[in-house]
Structures are given as C-alpha cells and as structure tokens.
Image (cartoon, rainbow, N blue to C red):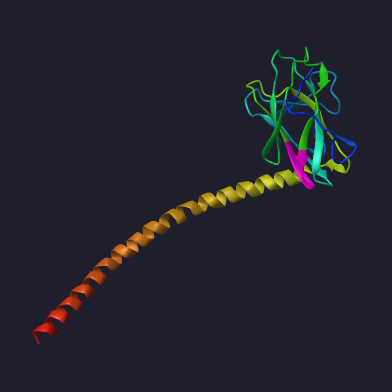
Amino acid sequence: SSSSSSSSSSSSSGGGEIVLQENEMGFCSVDGSVDNNNSGFTGTGFANTDNDFYKGIDWSVVVQESGNYDVQWRFANGSSDNRRANVIVNGALQADVDFDDTISWSGWEISDPITVFLTAGYNEIRAEALTNGGLPNIDSMSLFGSGASPGNAMVAAHRQAAQALQAALALQAAPVLQAAPVLQAAQALQAAPVLQAAQALQAALALQAAQV
C-alpha cells in the first residue's frame, strides 16, 4: 500500500469528486507516453513517464473557491522501489506522495490522499518523480471538493507558450541592455578631448588676461 508524507485533511470545499483520465479534459501532458499494454486500467490507457528524475504528469482543474482539496492517484508499480513524487501546484511545491510497489504492473491501487491548496479559478497540478525510475504507471487522478471541474489543456499550452515568448524576448533584450553601459562609456571617451580642449582654452584666456 502507499503512504503519504503529507497529512490528509477534509476538503474545505465540501464533497464531490472528479476523476481525470488520460487524453481527456483535465489531462495536460506526460513526460513519456500513454500506454495500454498492462491490464486493469480504466479509460483508454495509463500515463507512463520516462524512467528518470523529475519526469512527471500534469493535470489542470478549475475550482469555484480557494481552499484545501484532497488528491489521490490510481497507480501500478511493478518495481520493488517506492517511486516517490513531488506534488507541485501552480509551479510551487506543496507536498510529496509515496507510490510503493503494487507487486505487478497490473496491480492497481489508490494512493493515500494528499491535501493541496487551490486558488479560485484555473490550477495546474503536477506529480514529479523523485527517483531515477520515474513515476509509477498512473491510471487517473481524483480530486475531492465541491465546485471542481476539469481544466482545459489548451489554457496550459497557451500559458507555456506565453512564458516561452517572454523568455525569448528577455534573451533578445539582454544584449541591448548589456551594450548600453558600453555605449555610455564610448560617448564619455569621445567627449573627453572636447572637454580637455575647452579647459585648455579657458586657461589660455585667463593667462592672457593676467598679462594684460
């Protein structure tokens, strides 16, 4: 059975449950593939991440109220290792979850609930591997709390595209910002002979006036 390092608490938003299946609303992406070669899954298959650290799966949900919500995963882990994962919400680490072995890749179990805080509106939830084996096979993610619905994966895609564009624009602007001090220094150097000549002229005029 699996265990959680984050204590469970009842949702502040009341009852209700939504189940997010792969390739349906609320399922955003997997760092790997959606497979169906192991029996016992629900929906069209299960999410299978690549075997490496920090590989993960992303989901999105929309909630009507800010508050605590419980999350659980239906998973299979045929390895002998605990494929532990971070639970990241809107880019911030909130908890971690244990995915202990389930004897076989067709032995599906439900993880202990993890409590996360969601803000009213659109939220992204990511399970990210903490071992080099990646995540276990994930059949679905369930979120408990009233007023919750699956998010639109297109929103996540547009957000990622906007972030990539901002990064590209910042990179493009960097040489201009770096060139500004150099330009100022060059202008100062160019002006130096003019200032020196003016100072010499003033000195000559003062000397001439003194002789008179």
Q: Quadrant of residue 189?
A: bottom left
Q: Position of residue 41 (x, y in %)?
A: 84, 23
Per the rendered image, the range of residues in magenta is 117-125
Q: Quadrant of residue 56?
A: top right
Q: Quadrant of residue 35?
A: top right
122 is within the stretch colored magenta: yes
Q: Which image quarter holds the C terminus? A: bottom left
**Going by the image, does 208 lie left or right of 177?**
left
Quick one: which residue is furthest to the left in this view? 211
Q: Say which of 81 and 187 sits in front.
A: 81
Residue located 61% across and 50% down the image = 165
Residue located 71% across and 14% down the image = 79
Q: Say which of 63 and 78 sits in front.
A: 63
**Going by the image, does 24 lie left or right of 16?**
left
Mark count: 0
Residue located 83% across and 46% down the image = 65
Dominant secondary-structure state across the stretch colored magenta: strand
164 is within the stretch colored magenta: no
Q: Position of residue 71 (x, y in %)?
A: 80, 32
Q: Position of residue 175 (x, y in %)?
A: 45, 52
Quick one: which residue is furthest to the right in this view? 15
Q: Which image quarter holds the N terminus? A: top right
Q: Say which of 140 and 95 sits in front.
A: 95
Q: Position of residue 60 (x, y in %)?
A: 77, 40
